[in-house]
Image (tube, rainbow, N blue to C red):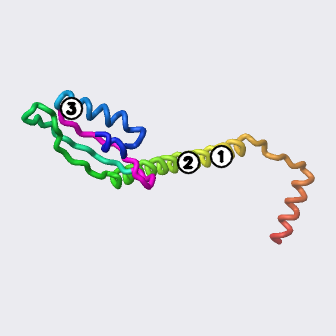
Amino acid sequence: MELILQRVHPEDKALVQQTIDRAAQDGKDFDFEHRLLMPDGSVKYVHVVAHALNDLSGMVKFVGAVMDVTETKQAEEALRRSEAYLATACSVLTLTVASRELKDSFNAFIRMIEPVPRNNSKEQAGKRRSSSSITE
């Protein structure tokens, strides 16, 4: 048992120990995932499945398999990061569109309430003369 626990990630040791102890005590099957800390410092994820058997002396023994699921875990994590990135991008895009619409609405409102500039009659008469002289 100590040999198995040597490679278990330090944060998972208690869970692994409890799972194996409980299964041995109750004579129950178990199925769980945990991490292994490799000598080079890398982390592997494993899925452990074991079936409890009683031998002739009444001792509980386990027959099972350990599967490396590291690539699956990495793919799941990459998918979660992509989903989070996409959610952030959608939020930013929504805020950008809303901001633009708000700015356009505000500008339209300002144009609507701005007073129309009044020109005095002399200026208007001069403008009329100059525009009529252009067309002549």
Closer mark to the observer between disc 3 and disc 2: 3
Q: Amino acid at mark 3?
A: Ala
Label 2: element kind: helix
Q: CA distance from mark 3 to mark 2?
A: 53 Å
Tag 2: amino acid: Val
What's the CA distance linking mark 2 and mark 1? 16 Å
| Depth order, front residue of 136/1 | 1
How dense is the environment of label 2, judged by Cα within 10 Å: few (below 14), some, or many (20 and up)?
few
Q: Determine whether the residue tagged by mark 3 lies in a helix, strand or loop.
A: helix
Q: Which residue is mark 3?
A: 24
Residue 85 falls within the magenta-colored stretch? no
What span is in magenta?
A: 28-43
Please say if the residues under marks 2 and 1 sit with CB atoms less than 8 Å apart. Answer: no
> CA separation, marks 3 and 1?
68 Å
Q: Extreme left residue here?
A: 56
In the image, residue 118 lies at what x, y percent? Answer: 84, 46
First reached walking from the N terminus: tag 2 or tag 1: 2
Most extreme residue toward the bottom, as rendered? 136
The residue lying at 34 percent from left, 34 percent from top is: 15
Tag 1 secondary structure = helix
- Residue 110 location, x and y as percent? 71, 43
Q: Earlier in the sequence, mark 3 or mark 2?
A: 3
Q: Quadrant of residue 12?
A: top left
Q: Nearer the viewer, mark 2 or mark 1?
A: 2
Is residue 36 highlighted in magenta? yes
What residue is drawn where x is 10% and y is 36%?
55
Q: Position of residue 71 (x, y in %)?
A: 35, 55
Q: Quadrant of the C terminus?
A: bottom right
What residue sits right under mark 1 in the picture? Answer: 103
Q: Which mark is residue 92?
A: 2
61 lies left or right of 92: left
